Image (cartoon, coloured by chain):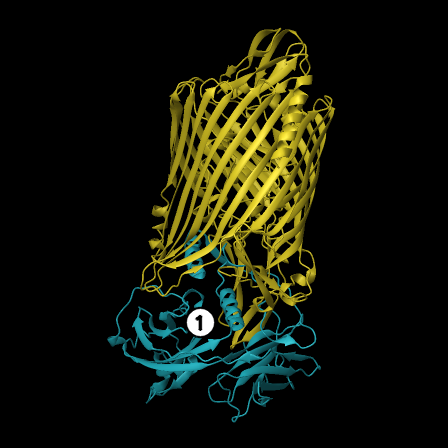
Chain colours: A cyan, B yellow
Amino acid sequence: MKRNILFILLAIFIQLSCVEQVELPYRNETPILVVDGEITNESPPYNLRLSYSGKFVSGSIITSRLAVNGARVILTDDQGNSVRFRQNIYEPALYQSDNQYQCQIGRSYSLRIEMPDGKVYITKPQLMKGVPAINNIYADKTQDFVRTYIDTKDAENSSDYYRWKSYSISLKITKGGGANTCSFSCWAYNRDEGINVFADTYINGKDIKKRLVHFSPIDPDAPLAKHYIEVKQMSISQEAYLFWEQYEEQRTRTGSIFDPLPSTIIGNVINEKDDKDFALGFFGVSGVTTRRLIVDPSQVSFSNELSIGLVPPPVVTQKPTSDCQTTYPGYGCTPPAEWK
Amino acid sequence: MRTTLLGVLLLLFSFHAISQSRFLLSGTVTDATSGQPIPGVGVFFSGLSSGTLTDSSGKYMVALPKGGYIVTMRALGYKVETFNINLNQNLTRSVQLSVRVDELAEVEIKTTKEDRNIKETQMGVVKLEMKNLKKIPVVFGETDIIKALTLQPGITTVGEGAGGFNVRGGRVDQNLVLLDGMPIYNTSHLLGFLSSINSDALSGVSLYKGGIPAQYGGRLSSLLEMNTKSGNAERLTGSVGVGLITSKVVLEGPILKNKITFMVAGRVAYPNFMINQFPAPTDKSKAFFYDLNAKIQYRINSKNILTLNSYRSYDNFKFADDTLYYAKTQNLSIQYSNLINKNLSLNFQGIYCNYNFGTQGYRTDYEFTLNSNVRHNELRAFALYTPKEQLKAEIGVNAIDYNISPGNLKPDVSTSSIITLDLPREFAREVSPYVSVDWSITSKISLQAGARYSIFQNLGPKQVFDYAEGQSRSSQSVIDSISYGKNQVIKQYGGIEPRLSLRFAITKSSAVKFSYNRMRQYLHLISNTTAISPVDFWKVSDKHIPPQIADQLSFGIFKNFKDNTYETSIEAYYKDIQNLVEYKNGARLYFNPTIETELIAAKGKAYGIEGSIQKNKGRLKGSLSYTYSRTLARVQSDFPSEQINRGEWFPSTFDKPHNLAISIQHFISNGWTFSANFVYASGRPATYPDRTYRLLGKTVIDYSSRNLDRIPDYHRLDASLLKDTRKTPEQKKYTTFSLSLYNIYGRRNPYSIYFVRYNNSIRSYRLSVFGSVIPAVAVTYNF
């Protein structure tokens, strides 16, 4: 609620005012552990990425220099069962559980990370809460996007926190690239940029109506091609909600006079012996339900409504002249045969 | 309490009986055209080296030995008035002074007000001359009290468009802003772009940066006292002004000649035409505001005056069909002054203040109204006793009743998914008796000493949580909850607040001054943004949030040159603050029933040195001031979630060490005046990223240390040209035109620096609120 006001307000100030890119000197703090992963009630394996924070200029890929090598990672539930996460040999930062151990709604889980230097980082036991089903999934379109919405019913008598993850597969057309037809037009994934979280504080026990969950870009050269959309509705803890809310707030900073002061986002992984020593990132425990939708753009209504609750990704105006399949995260030359 | 007050009053009466060996001369000095009292008029007597000054209601009173005197009255901007008296009994002489419009003629007047900085015990006081206010070039041509104050040493803002002001490193909520004694909780219009008080309605503005008199308390940093015009007693006068964003009207005059006067002032804004120029969806935004001042004064007889004051202000800002932000202030006060005898007056004031603000959402299925509210009811009573001209004593009490709603959310239609949520109201009362003495011990030494004892009680009904010892307060560490009944005391705070100002005159034109004051603040604005934002709310001290306490020491040297043509001063101060309200990293403040889990008590300190030179006479007037100041905070805690910058001192958001302001006004001829300002300030502290990490395949920026970086410096030049069509001072109907250029060389002063992820790299951007020169015109017609 608050962010929407400030966002639009800022738009006004920017018009009156101006924004320019500047170069500044940066301070660099010492690297610390970063934990990125979650477990759900879906089929294993579960993924966890362990890395070190880097200098200000480091890119978004976890290079082998930033990966944590040789950590011992164990997940334990409230009945004493445990599973080890083992380091992936192809992607050093990635630690994965085995294919047998599946997490369940109603159990509590805690994570233990024994670092190569002997430090031990842990999370407190976290309950895997159930999540209501998505009652409706539907879409409208704007000039640039197919927008997907869901309706669901919040449970009464409990404080619930939600997160939605989504992706879509749509047709992309490029200008040039390789020899086969697929180099000019291919089906590719569109993943979310932002984090979509919600607390039931203001609507407890009522319907969550028309929650915007996905933007699937419409290629101007293929405006009638179908969009294949998948939405996961997840239960998250209050801690996770606060973490992702702050993450999203800092990601969408606009320099407005009403921006909250930035600070480190403290997650839920701390040193076993010294709670002033904490890891960056978050280890999530979530219950998940999934819904899929096929959208034929000619069948959905055009809407002028503003996008609320989710910031649309930037619109690419210039067509790339490279191979479609290498430009976009490719799905294939043909759309999914089945989508249920 | 009541018996103490009575006791002291009796003491004062008996005091009075002793001092009857001389005769008294008293009276009121008023403006001949407007009929309004003139404060600060110098009253002199032939054969005596010292004189006296009229008080804020234009009254003066002296006790002199029997004899004949030539009395001279002098005030800046008025013609000198002289008359003879034969003092063989107590006399009353009320005098009318006529305005001197001709700026050049002012050069020849020798007024006592010029050496106010030397003669008054007070230091750290800024008085704005209302008639000079229009000559200061301002953005959009809107004359603005707060913008004018920020040209003075020690007064800053975090940036253009930010609401409120910071005094000597203090926060925005640490200023006590009083309009005719009524508190103003929101000093901004348009979310901070303009201040909420119509300057045309005002007769005087004083800002106390230190040495705050014992009469006032409840805020740490400063007192901003504004008084509205009391209404012309002779005839109906007024003015109409038209500007780019607002239009204003002021009307004043008698209702019943010499008995009842009135003043009304209104201001209406039309900023929408500007907003509509912007591309969609911003052009759908709408803003509106108005403010209204009204005053009725009834002079029942020469000894009794009844005054009714009212202030209303309304603001709304609608964002693109979706959300509307609003703020509404309703203030009302009734004041009764009774002159019991020539030495003693009694004053009573009852104040009602209701400040509402909130948000309305129009989105289908989520329609809501979120309202917050501060109700402040206050009673003030004081006795002013002047046994002789060198001694003035005041004793009084303020009692405030607070009733605050931190947030009330409700659906606007039955189909809305929004539920009703009501954070419990906060109740409190603050009772503060005080005494204050103004005493000129010799012609060289004077003092103003006083003490205030404030008692604050947080009251029920309320449910209060107890938290486990030895761990950080959080919703998980709640161990108990206690219910308090109506009016039951939950927590009491209080203590003595000594105030002292001392003056030693070295020569006739130089003095040194010293002051000390302790202040306590029980009401806090909860805001975790750089500038105060429309959703920030007020909170009283409670079981977990102790009052903020500040001790300030200051020292100054004052010297005037060339018959007071040049005024110079150097003031140094040091402030120590306890229990400053700080926020945990990533604090969740809105609609949080356990808000105390997000707040931490910090220590603060501020110090600085302010130097200024002013030229008060001649065709060219002006001032130059330079300030070096620092303001720092520290949070020490055993818990990681409460730690800020490892427990070390860090600069506050408005810590701007170097400040320079130059302001000139040049009277050309034929009513033309040219004015210019130049300001320079160090950039304010900011938090830059100091490492990155990878989450969900993306780069995340980490800000591990608060306020260790600084945005680039700020500087700006403004100029304006003013034309006054008056040919003679007596001319009643005239027009003033002003043309102003703000930010002449179009400097893109940084408001903020921020960082965003662009593809796989991080880019930094500078946001400037005004990216170019801003011209404006304004016209005012006076009648």
| Residue A88 visible in this rendered orientation of the protein | yes
- Viewport quadrant of the C terminus of chain B: top left
- How many marks the image carries: the answer is 1
Identify whether B601 is placed above or below B398.
below
> Which secondary structure lies at badge 1?
loop
Identify whether A33 is placed above or below B484.
below
Name which residue lies at 53% across and 40% down: B177
Q: x and y percent of residue B571 in the render? A: 68, 37
According to the picture, the residue beneath numbered tag 1 turns out to be A157
In the foreground, B664 or B591: B591
Question: In terms of image quadrants, where is residue B224?
Answer: top right
Q: x and y percent of residue B192 in the render? A: 47, 47
Identify whether A263 is placed above or below A46.
above
Name which residue lies at 67% across and 72% down: A275
For label 1, count other residues whose C-alpha is less than 10 Å away and answer few (under 14), some (14-19) or many (20+). Answer: few
Name which residue lies at 51% across and 87% down: A103
- Viewport quadrant of the N terminus of chain B: top right
In the foreground, A231 or B520: B520
Chain ID, mark 1: A
What kind of residue is marked 1? Answer: Asn
Question: In terms of image quadrants, where is residue B612?
Answer: top right
| Residue B781 visible in this rendered orientation of the protein | no
Say whether residue B638 is left or right of residue B279: right
For this orientation, the residue located farthest to the left is A299
For this orientation, the residue located farthest to the bottom is A100
In the foreground, A76 or B337: B337
Q: x and y percent of residue B47 in the render? A: 68, 9
Q: x and y percent of residue A315 in the render? A: 38, 69
